[in-house]
Amino acid sequence: MELHKRKFFSLLPVIASILFFFLKISIKTSQTKCSLLPHNHYWISSKRIVTPDGVISGAVEIKDGKVFSIVKEEDWHGYIRQGQIVDFGEAVVMPGLIDVHAHLDDPGRDEWEGFPSGTRAAAAGGITTLIDMPLNSEPSTVSEETLNLKIKAAKNRIYVDVGFWGGLVPDNALNATALERLLRAGALGLKSFMCPSGINDFPMTNITHIKEGLSILAKFQRPLLVHAEVQEDDLVKDNKNDAQLYSTYLETRPPSMEEGAIRNLLTISENTRVGGPSEGAHLHIVHLSDARSSLDLLKKAKSRGDSISIETCPHYLAFSADEIPDGDTRFKCAPPIRDAENKEKLWDALRNGDIDMLSSDHSPTLPELKLLQVGDFLKAWGGISSLQYVLPATWTSGRSYGVTLEQIASWWSEKPAKLASQHLKGSIAVGNYADIVAWEPESEFHLDENHPSHIKHPSISAYMGRKLSGKVLATFVRGNLVYKEGKHAPGACGNRLLAK
Ligand SMILES: [Zn+2]
């Protein structure tokens, strides 16, 4: 017995080194599965790094998935001794985009998009985090149970980080326990519609539902995202004009629908002020299209201290109604893309800070539902497919307005991070997650069927056929190089972001 024991102890170093060898292999395998880089301590260098303190030439040290240090070029001599350098030269190194409004339709309608294709497209487009909307999946995410279905569906199937909004619907709005369970289960906030959503299990809310929802959200310090359009009359049923004309569609969703919803919303928004009954909650207006009366009302409410933010989308900034060909239902979305003067006003509002941020509102479907043979604007699915292209789309139209890299980073990263309570995301700063995109603003490309698109149905995108500026070279999520020049890391290693 003694002898066996002694023999065992003498073999211990050998056993330990064998175990250590296999441990090393497994660590290495997991790194290469999640990242196209074999190491987790390295530097990203560039002549144009967008930081909260301006654009610098220098290097960002990445260690264990976070930004460990940032060094300006003039200071780095003798400083960078260890690790490897990934040099992007003149290309821009910027915080990864955070898309707070995407419909990935998973589980249940993943033939429309799904977590794998959606997040691969996101990675290829420089988006490092996206927050999935609670509707267009089947079922809608309106309870603890349905949120758990989403969380499960995303497991090992996402290539970037993904968080989830829950839905505020009549069923749960007046049921505090149900709403609290949904929020405790990790929903980052709630989303509601003030008009029919087009999805049967996601009915619209009235102002009482919204008021009650805000009072619960206040306890959790989370936002309510509102689709602000009201339907006063059935303008679709009453309209007898040619459904192939874009102008017909515009008549069915006038700016007064947005204005009416916002007027209604502003009757209770003061509850969110400091000292108000719903202090801590926040109202976020998704995809604002009307840059006239609706925006004026929101500006006033913001200036009087209501906790409100506003988003718009690249398609409202890139296109105007007069250029949408009749029958081309790829451009159908709600609220609709309006006239050229409205587009100019949206750009003004974005640049002067009245509109806070951008989102994709990527809302795909099957080609047969989007491109109905007759090009019928009243029957086709409403939603623009754009996820992978939002950075070049924003930059291509923004360049002529003198948009800066810092503004792009603010609209696409810094402000969205705040809305989604992602405090370690949104900027390249020491201690933050190393969520980074490297891209070439000056590179142009034709978005056509030969372009490597990763969304499931690129043919229905309104950007298809366009020439765009801004090529994404590489995308890092928590230090993992998840995408580089057409290639993805093999592992779906994105994190599910649950509110605590
Ligand atoms: Zn949407």
Image (cartoon, helix red, strand yellow):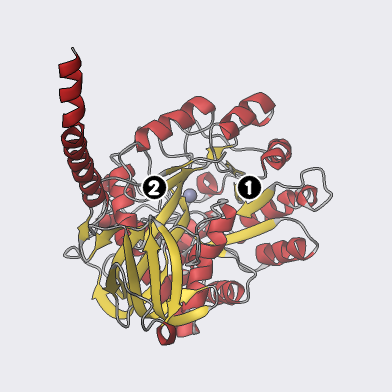
Earlier in the chain: of badge 1 and badge 2, it is 1
Decide if residue 328 is in sight here. Answer: no
Quarter of the figure with the C terminus: top right
Give residue 495's quadrant in the image. top left
Q: Which label was assigned to residue 59?
A: none
- Residue tagged by mark 2? 381
Give residue 262's quadrant in the image. bottom right
Q: Nearer the viewer, residue 200 or 150?
A: 150
Q: Nearer the viewer, residue 132 or 162?
A: 162
Amino acid type, mark 2: Trp
Find the residue positioned furthest to the front. 2
- Residue at the image point whose x is 71% and y is 49% from the top: 265
Return the x and y of residue 173 as percentages of the image width and height: 66, 31
Distance between the alpha carbons at the discs numbered 1 and 2: 28 Å
Mark 2 CB within 8 Å of ligand 1: no
Secondary structure under tag 2 reads: loop
Mark 1 vs mark 2: in front: 1
Find the residue positioned furthest to the right. 275
- Residue at the image point whose x is 51% and y is 44% from the top: 237
* Mark 1 nearby-residue class (10 Å; few <14, some 14–19, many ≥20): many
Return the x and y of residue 28 as percentages of the image width and height: 22, 49
Return the x and y of residue 42 as percentages of the image width and height: 32, 65
Quarter of the figure with the N terminus: top left
Decide if residue 296 is in sight here. Answer: yes
- Residue at the image point whose x is 55% and y is 51% from the top: 420
- Residue tagged by mark 1? 223
Q: Is residue 336 above or below residue 48?
A: above
